[in-house]
Amino acid sequence: MRITRIAAWQVDLPLHEGSYKWSGGKSVTVFDSTVVAVETDAGVVGYGEVCPLGPAYLPAYANGVRAGLKEIAPALIGQDPTQLGKLNRLMDAALKGHPYVKSAVDVACWDVLGKVSGLPVCALLGGRYGEDFHLYRAISQEAPDAMAANVAGYRAEGYRRFQLKVGGDPDTDIERIKAVAAVLKPGDRLVADANTGWLQHEAIRISKAVRDLDVYIEQPCLTYDECRAVRRQITQPFVMDENIDGIDVLMRAHADGAMDVVNLKISKLGGLTKTKQLRDLCVSLGIGMTLEDSWGGDIVTAAISHLAHSTPTEFLFSSTDFNSYVTRSIADGAPQRVNGRLAAPTEPGLGIRPKLREFGAPAVDVK
């Protein structure tokens, strides 16, 4: 089997809530996503998707996806899409860095591998654990009372894990955490995710102000060293996210005792192949994980579902269903949440069928 064409389409994903706000006053109203198709001479087509969280979250941006695909796609024409390790080496040789560019291609090739083997991707990633898995809901940054009301509403829909977007004014963030904690029930989990938005002294002060609450602190500061320093001075469970972008820093964080949970994002690491490598290492090291991506629609949600469902249940801290945040469906067959939980599709590959006719002309088309 050989790759004969790589095409990509730009798609807009508006939000149900109108906008999504996080630390530093950053916000997005319509997400700019890229759907990728990898066609083969056997007639099998695989699909992937990548959707950066705007241009100011990670070193990734939507137009960069399409520009980067034009660089790497020629090197992949004629290659076997089922040889995923080799394919990733070819992408790394064609374009240094920029893992988010490569992510959708890698996911599409897992889709191809699943289709030709007759297996869902989760079976190829390690097996299906349980009937489904729990999700978290990200709570966009608002006034404390509004965030508490949103948490109560989503809890009524079945969510039991909440990722509270903080990283703003310290006094307001303290009130946000307290207001949300007051509406939670036994068994709920609360994460205060600052998305690098606090200075070190602010993070320590805020954490100590809410020391009596059952709350996880996630990625409070910009740098690894700042986060590690905060971790050593507070008592809450600690989650690392933005700084963990490869095996080297994951191993360093483990050796330093710098985290209790790690957030692994598929596009941040370059696709399912490399994320699986870190996921399996975390299982061996005994580290809990949030498994997700930066953002996306139906195809990203399907990829997340296969990764999460193939992870031993006790190591899966949380995951998410991005297709429920947006107003537009871009693929049939995508997993849909039920009472705050999600299950990976059982069909071969990702189990989705993109609505290509709605996307218009491709932005990238390499044959």
Image (cartoon, grey):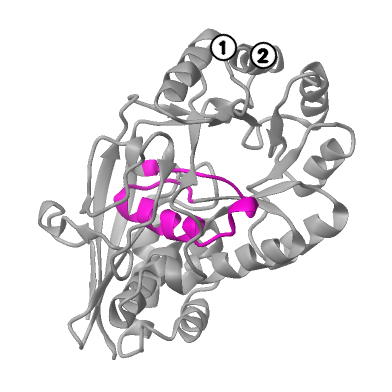
Specify the quadrant of the image occupied by residue 174. Answer: top right
Q: Is residue 176 left or right of residue 54?
A: right
Distance in Å between CA atoms under marks 2 and 1: 8 Å
**Measured from the top left, where is residue 233 in percent x and y?**
89, 33
In the picture provided, is 245 more to the left or to the right than 107?
Answer: right
Residue pushed farthest left? 357
Of the numbered discs 2 and 1, the one sitting upstream in the chain is 1
Is 106 located above or below residue 235 in the figure?
below
Q: Is residue 267 visible?
A: no
Write the residue at 34% across / 77% down: 73
- Figure quadrant of residue 166: top right
Quarter of the figure with the C terminus: bottom left
Bin the neighbour count of mark 1 within 10 Å (Cα to Cα): few under 14, some 14-19, many 20 and up.
Answer: some
Check disc 2 and give the amino acid type.
Lys
Residue 177 rendering spot, x and y as whole percentages: 65, 18
**Residue drawn at (38%, 56%), measured in percent from left and top?**
344
Q: What range is drawn magenta here?
A: 293-322
Q: Are marks 2 and 1 in contact (CB under 8 Å)?
A: yes
Q: Secondary structure at mark 2?
A: helix
Look at the picture and state if 338 lies above or below 311.
above
The spot of residue 40 in percent (x, y) is 24, 83
Which residue bears the numbered disc 2?
A: 178
Mark 1, residue position:
144
Instruction: Work out which residue is located at the far top of the displayed protein and give it.
Output: 145
Which of the two residues, 128 or 152, is positioned nearer the viewer here? 128
Give the residue at x 16% y 55%. 355
Kind of residue at disc 1: Pro
